[in-house]
Image (tube, helix red, strand yellow):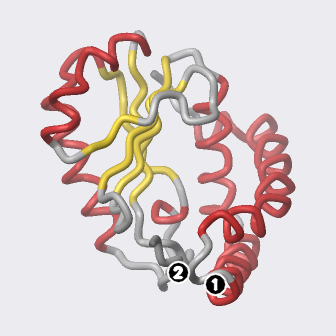
Amino acid sequence: MRKVEVLNYDRQWSTAFEVEAQKLKRVFKDKMIVIFHIGSTSVPGLKAKPIIDILPVVKDITEVDDYLIEMNALGYEARGENGIRGRRYFQKGHDNRTHHLHFFEKDSKEIIRHLAFRDYLRTHPLEAGKYGALKESLAIKHSTDIHAYIEGKNAYVKKVEQKALAWFERFGNLHQHRF
């Protein structure tokens, strides 16, 4: 059973991202264009489940499927698209998850959606604080029900995501991501 636990921000999360990013770069070499730390653990000061979300951008999403043996050797379980068309999703740690990988092909609109959300929270600490407080209260209320936890934050995430995309469209050139 997965326990829902939200912790105070830990600077080690960025180090954990860097360590894992290096492993992935060794596996995918020139197939990978760039790799981003996303999700709550990528936002300094934000409370989060201690799971590192990583977004590798690849030239051809179908080529990710050629590396399932290597990914398994790194401890990852392949989950296919897992609800988002054009994604390749992997998780590490079974019930004690440590990492989620969200591979997207270079032209996917999903990349900007994830980066806009991350960058918006990084530059809007009050919004990040509200989000952290919501996650903390949901984790207490649904400590053994990950699905209820996710559902509980869904409406808030969608609302912030819309603000983030509008903000990114207006100010994205300040935080331009080239790949």
- Name the residue carrying label 2: 6
| SS at mark 1 in the image | helix
Q: Which of the pair 10/146 is nearer the observer?
A: 146
Q: Residue at x 53, y 32 (%)?
A: 177
Q: Are marks 2 and 1 in contact (CB under 8 Å)?
A: yes
Q: Calculate the distance from the C-alpha at mark 2 to the C-alpha at mark 1.
A: 6 Å
- Characterize the local packing of mark 2: few (<14), some (14-19) or many (20 or more) Cα atoms within 10 angstroms: many
Q: Nearer the viewer, residue 120 or 76?
A: 76
- The amino acid beneath tag 1 is Glu
Q: What is the number of the mark on residue 136?
A: 1
Residue 115, picture quadrant = top right
Please name whichever residue, 105 or 139, is drawn nearer the observer in this view of the structure. 139
Asked if 81 appears above or below 116 in the picture, the reply is above
Residue drawn at the location 66% of the way across and 44% of the way down:
116
Percent position of residue 13, x then y: 34, 67
Three-letter code, disc 2: Val
Q: Say whether residue 133 is left or right of residue 49.
A: right
